[in-house]
Amino acid sequence: PVIRTSPFTPSLIGSFTPLEMPTYRFEAARDSGKLESGDIEADSARAARSALRARGLVPVSLEPLAGMRTAEEKISGRRLRESELALATRQLASLLSAGLPLDVALATLVEQSENDAQREIFRAVRGDISAGHRLAEALSRHPRAFTPVYCATVSAGEQVGNFGVVLEKLAQYLEDKQALRSKLIAAATYPAIVTVVAMAIVLFLMTNVVPQVVQVFEQTRQALPWPTKVLLAMSWFLGQFGIWLALAIGGAIYALRMALRRPGPKYAWDRAILRLPLFGRLIQGVETARFASTLAMLSEAGVPVLRALAAAQATLNNSVMREVVESAIEKVREGAGIARSLAAAKAFPPVLIRLIETGEATGNLAVMLGHAARNQAREVERRAGAASTLLEPLLILVMGAVVLAIVLAVLLPIIEINQLVR
């Protein structure tokens, strides 16, 4: 016989019940062989099955109600912004340090989340915790929201038993990373705006102003100066083939991006970037600061050195530096020191190598890596500020020179016509 039961909320989820939890239609069997069916609200399908087992039922089928989306469907393809993740991590660390159970702390995050994606992700994580999974395992089920570095740090906190402190350090790491990125974006914003405005002005002059002046010159039937001829030729070319030129540039950018997905061209590109006079050192500093801060945090959290190196390597975007770290991991696995292994290829700044060497000798590797990360971050800020200070007047001069050339090319025939009239 099939017994229809009323909807219930699983006891494992606790006294707090988030709003708009997915509802599932289930069929389950008891030990006696009787089948029961009904509706159950749970954070996820796994949490629903766990709640059914807690009631002495063996799930036979579990389907979301028509029109209802499961937690997995809601968070599919979603990710958290770094600012949201840093704030949520800081809040979770504070709640756990205050002595709240993990389930209640996650429920609080779900309740106060203002972003739908964040709410559904943490609701799904809470459902996995209710189903008996560890937090690191539950987080790893959402790789677009939680990076391997994040999951490795959480796993280390679970192992050492100092969960709140580890999460505080993880939140600080995310906040420092976000702060460095914000400063780099702020340094590049003004030059980017000047460049866009300059290109817009030049395109407007070439496609709207210059063609109108051409009609005046054609009526005079006078020989035009060569600067004016060049300007008119460029204006005609943009008017006739401007769209095709834009498509060609877009196609070239797309082809370059596709080529950079292949290991060979990507490695050659990254190596060329590192050799640039000013921006090469800036890129190296950004990568070094990210690598050192990640390695420092994982080392301080108690993550084994090989696992910490592998996680820190995953944060590097430059394939040349990634290859150096990969080679260093093999050497460390064979018993060599980190400093000596990284120094072989000379891809990282000597200051980082010296500080790591000192940390290995004194047993304060995490402290020395923290110093290295802060020093590199300050160096990156200084270089980014210097580059921005240099680019701003340079871009203004270039824009002024281009506009002046256009104005002179337009004025030269007008001056010659006035001289003929006199």
Image (cartoon, grey):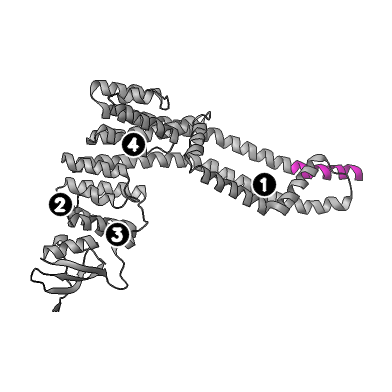
Left or right position of 275 against 5: right
Residue 322 can be seen in this image: yes
Q: Residues within 10 Å of mark 3 (few under 14, many from 20)?
A: many
Left or right position of 89 against 203: left
Q: Amino acid at mark 3?
A: Glu
* Image: magenta residue range: 407-422
Residue at mark 3: 120
Q: Is residue 413 magenta?
A: yes
Q: Amino acid at mark 2?
A: Pro
Q: Quadrant of the N terminus?
A: bottom left
Q: State the image coordinates of residue 132 (x, y, percent, origin top left).
A: 17, 54
**Picture disc at residue 101:** 2
Residue 317 higher or lower than 359, as above or below = below
Most extreme residue toward the front is 33
Residue 422 can be seen in this image: no
Secondary structure beneath dot 4 equals: helix
**Picture disc at residue 312:** 4
Separation of residues labelled 4 and 1 (CA atoms):
45 Å
Asked whether the residues under the numbered discs 4 and 1 touch, taking CB atoms below 8 Å apart as contact, a structural biologist would say: no
**Closer to the observer: label 1 or label 3?**
3
Q: Residue at x 31, y 52 (%)?
A: 142
